[in-house]
Amino acid sequence: MHISTATVATAHAQRYMVQLCKHFGHKVTAEFDDQGGRIAFPMGETRLAVGPEGLALSAQANSPEDLVRLEEVIASHLKRFAFREPDLAVDWRPTPA
């Protein structure tokens, strides 16, 4: 399993987490509550958690290529939803196996 994580500094972590889960929930399995969520794609899974520093993301996939694609999909949608925060950064970091 290939895993990467990112913490996105934002004061709107819960709003973005809900938007991501609802958006992807129309096509894939997605669930969320007040503090976290999970989106299951065919290529892998992303877990989201609302915290004091922002939105914590954890992506996991079976191959490095799928992990890169998953990171790109989540980051691009998050940046689109956070258009009022032009400096919002999603810096994925690989997690050692």
Image (cartoon, helix red, strand yellow):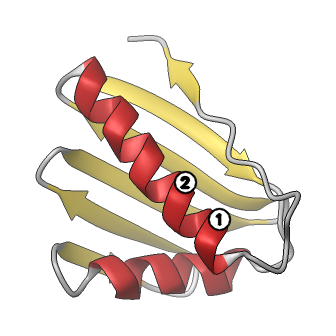
Seen from the viewer's position, the closer of residues 87 and 11 is 87
User: Residue 81, percent across and down?
Assistant: 62, 78
Q: Residues within 10 Å of mark 2 (few under 14, many from 20)?
A: many
Question: Is the Cβ of the residue at disc 2 closer than 8 Å to that at disc 1?
Answer: yes
Residue 82 seen by the camera: yes
SS under mark 1? helix
Please tell me whether residue 72 is drawn above or below residue 28 in the rendered image. Answer: above
When asked about the image quadrant of residue 72, the answer is: top left
Q: Amino acid at mark 2?
A: Ala
Seen from the viewer's position, the closer of residues 1 and 64 is 64
Q: Which mark is residue 44?
A: none
Residue 1 seen by the camera: no
Which corner quadrant holds the C terminus? top left
Which corner quadrant holds the N terminus? top left
Residue displayed at 16% across by 79% down: 27
Q: Is 61 positioned to the left or the right of 58 in the image?
A: left
Residue displayed at 33% across by 32% down: 67
User: Residue 12, percent across and down?
Assistant: 77, 80
Please tell me whether residue 51 is drawn above or below residue 75 in the rendered image. Answer: below
Residue displayed at 63% across by 42% down: 6
Q: Is 70 positioned to the left or the right of 50 in the image?
A: left
SS under mark 2? helix
User: Residue 87, percent across and down?
Assistant: 88, 57
Which residue in the protein does label 2 denote? Answer: 75
Q: Residues within 10 Å of mark 1 (few under 14, many from 20)?
A: some
Q: Is 84 positioned to the left or the right of 15 in the image?
A: right
Gap between marks 2 and 1, in whole Å?
6 Å
Which residue in the protein does label 1 denote? Answer: 79
Q: Amino acid at mark 1?
A: Lys
User: Residue 14, percent across and down?
Assistant: 66, 81
Seen from the viewer's position, the closer of residues 95 and 43 is 43
Residue displayed at 65% across by 65% down: 79
